[in-house]
Image (tube, rainbow, N blue to C red):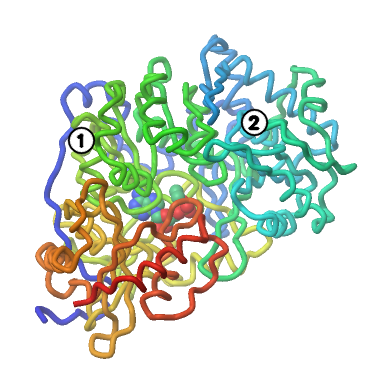
Amino acid sequence: MTQSPGQGKALDNLLTESRTFPPSDEFAAQANAKPELYEEAKADREAFWAKQAERLHWDTKWDQVLDWSDAPFAKWFVGGKLNVAYNCVDRHVESGHGDQVAIHWEGEPGDSRAITYAELQREVSKAANALTSLGIGAEDRVAIYMPMVPEAIFAMLACARVGAMHSVVFGGFSAEALRTRIEDSSCRLVITTDGQYRRGNPAPLKPAVDEAVAGAPSVEKVIVVKRTDTEVAWTDKDVWWHELVDSQSDQHTPEAFDSEHPLFILYTSGTTGKPKGILHTSGGYLTQTSYTHHHVFDLKPDTDVYWCTADIGWVTGHSYIVYGPLSNRVTQVVYEGTPNTPHEGRHWEIIQKYGVSIYYTAPTLIRTFMKWGADIPAKYDLSSLRVLGSVGEPINPEAWIWYRENIGGGKAPIVDTWWQTETGAIMISPLPGVVATKPGSAQRPLPGIGAKVVNDEGVEVEHGGGGYLVLDEPWPSMLRGIWGDEERYKDTYWSRFADQGYYFAGDGAKYDSDGDLWLLGRVDDVMNVSGHRISTTEVESALVSHPTVAEAAVVGASDATTGQGIVAFVILRGGAGDDAGGAEAIKALRDHVAKEIGPIAKPRQIMVVPELPKTRSGKIMRRLLRDVAENRAVGDVTTLADSSVMDLISAGLQSGKSED
Ligand code: WTA
């Protein structure tokens, strides 16, 4: 053993990565973000945020930037009034951009639709009138359970326009998941489709709504968009979108709502127990999504074509497809389907077709592209891309480099953006054109944001040290609570470092020797090997840095001698060769980790698997892998994207043991 773990030390810092990529002079010269932004925010944080809020149209200006007297319940831009939908749609038409395409919508079967801001205004107005005709107004809750069709975005904006709160439930969730979410916030209306295209085939969606609504008495009406034209059962609560909405006037005068007027609830599953309804409000949320989208993605509304690949069922779809981008007058691609339908080059084909210049996706997808092989993107013209983004998980340095080289042409800056459903908008990210990027690091809190890494006692760790990531200043787009449960809000986020008043995000992180931040995964996943607190992220990144490995997940399994032993599950890259899963190759992988990180992090066991268990938003479910590693019956798999994955993994394990 090389060192004994220090007192109060939350996490060891093991992996080092020293590559950096400074911005080119050309990029820096044209960048929206300038180095002074950091200074400006530091000099006067509230004045800085007030200036960012000026990006929006306010019907009534606020008289106080922040009221934190009732912490942890914040109020931002107190006394201000605005309409969120007006800010995302109408004002762009009024400023003469009605003919600009807002959304290039690409359906999975290959159908497409270009929607201008003028058309968006008409569609959202009609939908708003339809909501009013059903008696839906301020603070009513509306559940939206839809695939990635334009009407999903119209519906969200229509809710915002009339002051109703939307609760978008991902279209891949079950009837039961939908029912509990509808029930928790007593939704009066559900908006859905007859079906959805998934992997080339229409799949029914409405039956799940029927089942959910049968057990959710708060629902009075269900609006159904015809997407797949599949036959659906009909109840007296149901009404077709094309009958109700299309007959409405396309004129609608938006009303200004208070800055703290609730905008939406989005459920996020906790590690245990029932999902939490994360509550977001209007003025602060729109200010920060707009500010971050402008600076982090360097958006130029007249020339860029932006594409965020998230689903509107996740917060990334809310903040970086709908609110941030549209408030900035984006032209964006919205794609309905999966990345390998009808072929594994679909994303690159879409980028080539629309000349996409900014592309924002998740590490899980980047690693999948790595597995499919670099020859696929190589067949397309991706030269329009100038900024790449990543969100959702730590991005392994090797995946980052692969992304830069094979997608970004070796030059597009990559912004690794750390944030959460709870934070509402990006909190930590390099600013392109200002910060020299480092593969695998989210680097710095954005100007105006306070974040640091602390130890068990809440004391900031030194450069080179690891610990807990906390947010030490309130921020405009912060959650305002958990729907219907104030205590749970305080307990979940504000109790761990109550003395210091810090928000604890649940993530581990470290500083490198420059003071840049590296995210190390959820602290619940941290492994303890012979008293060393080792992050899953670092060991996974070491594995992915081997040329044969596309994706890896590691867990700590109980071990008689070391407390926990590291067990790794790996997916091989396309073209890794037939021997890559053999005993020799596995030994080489274990040695590789020992070399990259140190003998302490050498996996006890490595298993080659065809897939990893992931949530529907692409995060690896290590809890289930821990069950496998400890030979237990696999636990609750209801949030798993594909429940057959665990069978595949277990079957593979029986056929070949890789322990040496
Ligand atoms: C993780 C997604 C490392 C993290 C916007 C966080 C990340 C959780 C990153 C929130 C990143 C997100 N680097 N980890 N760039 N981005 N995460 O609520 O663990 O779906 O707490 O929000 O994802 O996930 P959520």
Instruction: Please provide percent x and percent y for residue 474.
Output: 46, 53
Label 1 near ligand 1 (CB < 8 Å): no
Is 346 situated above or below 362?
above
- Please report the residue visible at 19 percent of the width from the left and 21 percent of the height from the top: 26
**Left or right of 412 in this view: 485:** right
**Relative side of 375 to 122, left or right:** left
The residue positioned 26% from the left and 79% from the top of the image is 565
Q: Position of residue 210 (x, y in %)?
A: 78, 49
At 80% from the left and 58% from the top, the residue drawn is 215
Q: Which residue is mark 1?
A: 405
Circle on res. 424: none
In the rendered image, the quadrant that contains the C terminus is bottom left
Q: Determine if residue 613 is in view.
A: yes
Q: Amino acid at mark 2?
A: Asn
Q: Quadrant of residue 115?
A: top right
Asked which secondary structure carries label 2, the reply is loop
Q: Quadrant of the N terminus?
A: bottom left
Splitting the image into 4 quarters, where does residue 226 fall?
top right
Q: CA distance from mark 1 to mark 2?
A: 42 Å
> Can you identify the residue that label 2 sits on?
83
Q: Nearer the viewer, residue 393 or 454?
A: 393
Q: Residue furthest bottom?
A: 560
Amino acid, disc 1: Glu
